[in-house]
Image (spheres, rainbow, N blue to C red):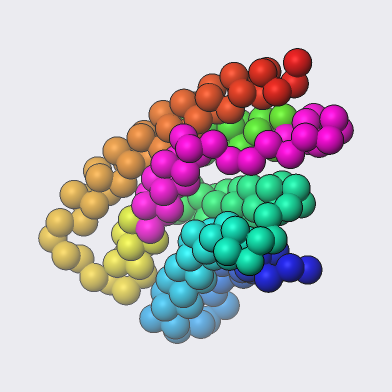
Amino acid sequence: MKQADSITASRIVLAPLFFILFSWGIPLGLPRILVVIVLWVLFIVMEISDLIDGAVARKTNQVSNFGKLFDPFADVLARLGYFICFMSAGLMPHWVFFIILFREYSMLFMRLLLVQKGIAMGARKGGKLKSFTYALAGGVSLFIWSLGMLSLDTGINNVFVIGNFVLYCIAALLALGSFIDYFKEFRKVNK
């Protein structure tokens, strides 16, 4: 496995760890502060790995068709994993999760169709902005959840909740927009 692929694979390992710790860490009796700290570390490492794996692949001349498919798969697994956690905690609207789920699985399906023709279509620019918004909304959700777990009422928690809802709405719009853009390119390439 190439260096960039190893960085990408870290998200596939960390995503279930995030889910397990978020869901069962506190019920199993782990200290709340420990759970919060480890979740932040996992979240940050997953997001940083998404930023650097492509850069490492380009810098070391390791860009491959495998990486073009493996990277979005790891992204989807990591983000859907933490979005399920935030949705279950009431921090992410169900309808936003459905739009994102629909977008991500549709994109993976289109990529698989292209692979059958020997084409590996990489990410598009709109997808980068969407990914940033996903990460930002996820980070704000984790921040709000952390405040609750640590019983820290800042007095402006509702501002964060409203801001997070707005971020999720923007994420849903960007998900739809990037899907439409990808679908148009898919149709051109697939002809």
Q: Give the vertical position of 84 relative to 114 (above or below).
A: below
Residue sitting at 68 percent across and 36 percent down? 121
Which quadrant would the C terminus be assigned to in this image? Answer: top right
Residue 44 in picture, x, y percent from top left: 45, 68
Q: Residue at x 68, y 48 (%)?
A: 68
In-image side of 8 versus 86 (left or right): right
Quick one: 49 or 143, which is closer to the camera? 49
Left or right of 115 in this view: 171: left
Residue at image point 45% right, 40% down: 130
Residue 152 visible somewhere in the drawing? yes
Q: Residue furthest left?
A: 155
- What kind of secondary structure does the magenta stretch mostly adopt? helix
Q: Is residue 71 magenta?
A: no
Q: Decide whether residue 112 is among the magenta residues.
A: yes
The answer, for residue 53, to whether it is visible in the render is: no
Q: Position of residue 47 (x, y in %)?
A: 49, 61
Q: Residue at x 61, y 37 (%)?
A: 104
The outermost residue toward the right is 116
Q: Quadrant of the N terminus?
A: bottom right
The region drawn magenta spans 111-139
The quadrant where residue 124 appears: top right
On screen, residue 170 versus residue 154, left or right, reads right
Q: Residue 148 sits in which quadrant? A: bottom left
Of 130 and 143, which appears nearest the observer? 130
- Closer to us: 111 or 109: 111
Task: Locate residue 61, reporting x and y percent.
Answer: 66, 61
